[in-house]
């Protein structure tokens, strides 16, 4: 029998995040700090709207691009929060989470052999999605000494005559790094000069601490060459509702909608109805959750530093990315030993790119009580191995 499998798909490695998530489910008493999922329930008024939609019989397909009412609310939200103006009828597509939007954007924009620049460490889906779209992923190693920001010099050094797209993963998963307006302006100049396009993954845009998120699409000359990706999973604790969206130039969105039309048809109607309520009346919920994450962030960074980790202080998302280089262990060795000895699951930094070696990703999308228990175990692990500050 001939090989039934696609060689390109077979060559893609499984997610390094899911590896530890699957193991921890089999260990009694284990605590997972590995999955990027809010521990908050979806706010009741949002759930209620989803329930009400079912009760009213709103169980039919919507238009491929999504409910017009939802797209209008997305446009209002982006205008209010980011100063971005989109035609909700032609420049917004509602998708199955932000991940589908990333995949559709790459497939709509890439020809075989086009290069895509991907700053790493980063979300695990970018490289596989580029590969599946017949593009060539080109990674750029972000450096802790630069606060895990993408610099103008790093960008220029990676561009070739085949470069077409730059993925901007900020606020960043896993590092918590952000890009300020000044940082983005330096990058935007290069993008315009080199005639590149940007896919800006802004799923954590509402989860920043100390300063507001700035979208690169809001800078002069950038909206017409940027696809903004966002969604409801992180900001509104709606992970299981599977709802995201893409905004950008009509010519690109038209092709993305075609892909979405044939692969998906439309996003779940119930989720779309609930999302309308989230955008209209969810600002206080977002603020409440952000304040809780900020408290956890400060607690986690303080405790880790006290244990001897060198921990970059994140300014966005809900992850910390402490260095374990002083232990002499690899990221995978450390995470495996910690899970075996203390039943605490974290994610090796290498799950987010080779440059993540020597780091761990720890999520603080968990209660202070769970974090305290897990950190007590990590502290015991460090003392048992006689690790100290570098």
Image (cartoon, grey):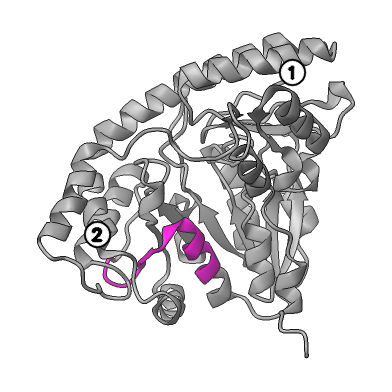
Q: CA distance from mark 1 to mark 2?
A: 44 Å
In percent of width and height, residue 320 lies at 62, 29
In the displayed structure, 324 sits above or below 27; it is above
Few, some or many residues within 10 Å of mark 1 (<14, 14–19, 20+):
many
Asked if residue 104 lies in the magenta stretch, the reply is yes
In percent of width and height, residue 247 lies at 40, 62
Residue at image position (28%, 33%) is: 285
Q: Quadrant of the C terminus?
A: top right
Q: Is residue 342 among what the camera can see?
A: yes
Asked if residue 266 lies in the magenta stretch, the reply is no
Q: Would you name the residue on which mark 2 appears?
A: 270
In the displayed structure, 265 sits above or below 290; it is below
Q: Would you name the residue on which mark 1 appears?
A: 309
> Farthest residue in the bottom direction?
1
Q: In the visual, does 186 lie left or right of 73?
A: right
Residue at image position (56%, 40%) is: 35
Query: What range is drawn magenta here?
Result: 88-105
Task: Work out whether residue 10 or residue 170 is closer to the camera in this orientation and state it.
Answer: 10
Task: Work out whether residue 307 or residue 226 is closer to the camera in this orientation and state it.
Answer: 307
Task: Work out whether residue 216 or residue 261 is closer to the camera in this orientation and state it.
Answer: 261
Label 1 secondary element = loop
Residue at image position (41%, 62%) is: 96
């Amino acid at each position: 029998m001939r090989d039934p499998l696609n060689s390109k798909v077979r060559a893609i490695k499984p997610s390094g995040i899911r590896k530890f998530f699957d193991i921890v489910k089999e260990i009694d008493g284990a605590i997972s700090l590995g999955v990027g999922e809010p521990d908050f329930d979806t706010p009741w008024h949002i759930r209620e709207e989803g329930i009400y939609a079912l009760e009213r019989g709103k169980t039919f397909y919507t238009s491929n691009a999504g409910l017009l009412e939802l797209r209008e609310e997305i446009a209002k939200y982006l205008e209010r929060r980011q100063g971005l103006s989109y035609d909700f009828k032609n420049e917004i597509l509602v998708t199955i989470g932000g991940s589908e939007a990333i995949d559709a954007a790459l497939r709509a924009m890439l020809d075989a052999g086009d290069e895509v620049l991907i700053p790493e460490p980063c979300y695990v889906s970018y490289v596989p999605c580029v590969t599946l779209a017949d593009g060539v992923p080109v990674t750029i190693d972000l450096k802790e000494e630069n606060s895990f920001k993408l610099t103008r010099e790093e960008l220029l050094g990676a561009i070739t005559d085949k470069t077409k797209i730059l993925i901007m993963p900020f606020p960043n998963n896993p590092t918590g790094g952000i890009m300020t307006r000044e940082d983005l302006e330096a990058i935007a100049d290069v993008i315009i000069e080199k005639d590149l396009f940007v896919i800006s993954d802004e799923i954590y845009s509402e989860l920043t601490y100390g300063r507001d998120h700035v979208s690169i699409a809001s800078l002069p000359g950038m909206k017409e060459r940027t696809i903004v990706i966002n969604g409801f999973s992180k900001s509104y604790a709606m992970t299981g509702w599977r709802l995201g969206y893409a905004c950008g130039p009509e010519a690109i969105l038209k092709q993305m909608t075609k892909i979405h039309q044939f692969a998906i048809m439309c996003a779940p109607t119930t989720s779309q109805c609930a999302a309308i309520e989230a955008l209209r009346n969810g600002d206080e919920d977002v603020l409440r959750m952000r304040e809780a994450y900020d408290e956890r962030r400060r607690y986690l960074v303080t405790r880790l530093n006290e244990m001897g980790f060198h921990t970059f202080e994140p300014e966005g998302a809900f992850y910390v990315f402490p260095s374990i280089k002083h232990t002499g262990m690899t990221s995978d060795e450390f995470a495996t030993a910690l899970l075996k000895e203390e039943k605490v699951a974290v994610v090796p930094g290498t799950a987010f790119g080779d440059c993540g070696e020597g780091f761990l990703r720890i999520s603080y999308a968990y209660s202070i009580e769970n974090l305290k228990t897990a950190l007590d175990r990590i502290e015991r692990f460090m003392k048992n191995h006689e690790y100290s500050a570098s």
